[in-house]
Amino acid sequence: MKSSIFHGLSAFPITPCDDNGRIDENGLSNILGRLANARVDSIGLLGSTGTYMYLDRAARQRAIEIARQSVGTEVPLIVGVGALRTNESEQFAKDAEQAGASGLLLAPVSYTPLNSEEVFQHYVSVAGATRLPLCIYNNPTTTHFTFDVALIERLSKIDNIVAIKYPGAPASEMPSVIKPLRDAVSADFSVGFSGDWNAANALMAGGDAWYSVAGGLLPVPCLELTHAAKAGNHSEVKRVDELLQPLWALFQELTSIRVMYAAADILGLTHSNPPRPILPIAKSEHQRIARALEGLSA
């Protein structure tokens, strides 16, 4: 049986803060309330969209506390615990467990490029720090490390490493992406995908989960797309994906994190900017983003 929290739509919200990295508590609660009301399958708190690497330990802890207060215990919280040092990731994992996280997401963050054995030992140490199930985060664009199938297979044998978040691909490439992963891991290991504009392809090819940036602010259409893809309803997938195409285009042009901050501002949920040195999208671009949001329900 698949690990119950690593399936369906996992919504990844921004973590709104002030210029000093203090959480905008009302803003975060507003965003998380939308996700809980829509009944997403899980919330990916402190992921890349949640700017975890820009937050200190206190801010990370406070974000988890706010999330639990905002969504209760019914929505699983998958919390990012990446850090430059292994001992820090271990501490963040323990903090997350103590604060009520349901599972962990770990990327191999590093300044110095890592080799496979270093990544393996890093995951062994962090997985051993708590009893929570852990998802491997393969994010080569950010970490400059790519998990090969042999390393994924090796990591999947560790008791509480039960899932992977993997980059999605165009429809024609998905069978060749997913089959080696499925062949390398056990049937109860969850294989999920990121990359919103490839989400439908990944789910229809047999992916267990969609780890979604857009879902962190616009859960309703993303749930509709998830349910249609998992059911193999091609016409509904096409309908919803076409509604989302203007947003996907903006993600690819302006980057998803910057677009999500601007969208949250347009929707009146928070007026926080991304953490510096990331600069917000110019106000002159907001009209384009507002048009892309039209017709996308909360």
Image (cartoon, rainbow, N blue to C red):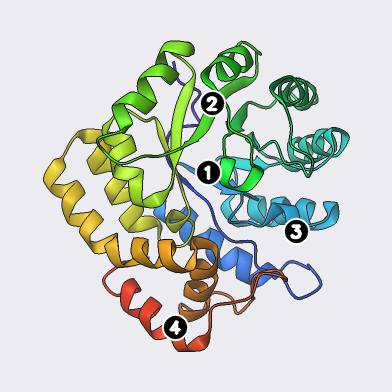
Q: Residues within 10 Å of mark 1 (few under 14, many from 20)?
A: some
**Which amino acid type is shown beneath numbered disc 1?**
Val
Q: Residue 141, image x and y in percent?
A: 57, 46
Mark before the other along the chain sequence, 4 or 2: 2
Quadrant of residue 201 within the rendered picture = top left
**Which amino acid type is shown beneath numbered disc 2?**
Ala
Tell me the element at label 4. helix
Quadrant of residue 1 within the rendered picture = top left
Which residue is denoted by mark 4 in the rendering?
A: 285
Kindly report which numbered mark, 2 or 3, lies closer to the viewer in this rendering.
3
Distance (Cα) linking label 3 and label 4: 25 Å
Q: Residue furthest bottom?
A: 284
Which residue is denoted by mark 2 in the rendering?
A: 163
Distance (Cα) linking label 2 and label 3: 25 Å
Mark before the other along the chain sequence, 3 or 1: 3
Q: Residue 236, image x and y in percent?
A: 16, 48
The disc label shown at residue 54, or none: 3
Tell me the element at label 1. loop
Distance (Cα) linking label 4 and label 1: 34 Å
Kindly report which numbered mark, 3 or 1, lies closer to the viewer in this rendering.
3
In the image, 189: left or right of 53?
A: left
Distance (Cα) linking label 3 and label 1: 25 Å
Residues 167 and 289: in front is 167
Q: Residue at x 44, y 33 (%)?
A: 192
Q: Residues within 10 Å of mark 2 (few under 14, many from 20)?
A: many
**Which amino acid type is shown beneath numbered disc 4?**
Glu
Tell me the element at label 2. strand
**Which amino acid type is shown beneath numbered disc 3?**
Tyr
Distance (Cα) linking label 4 and label 2: 37 Å
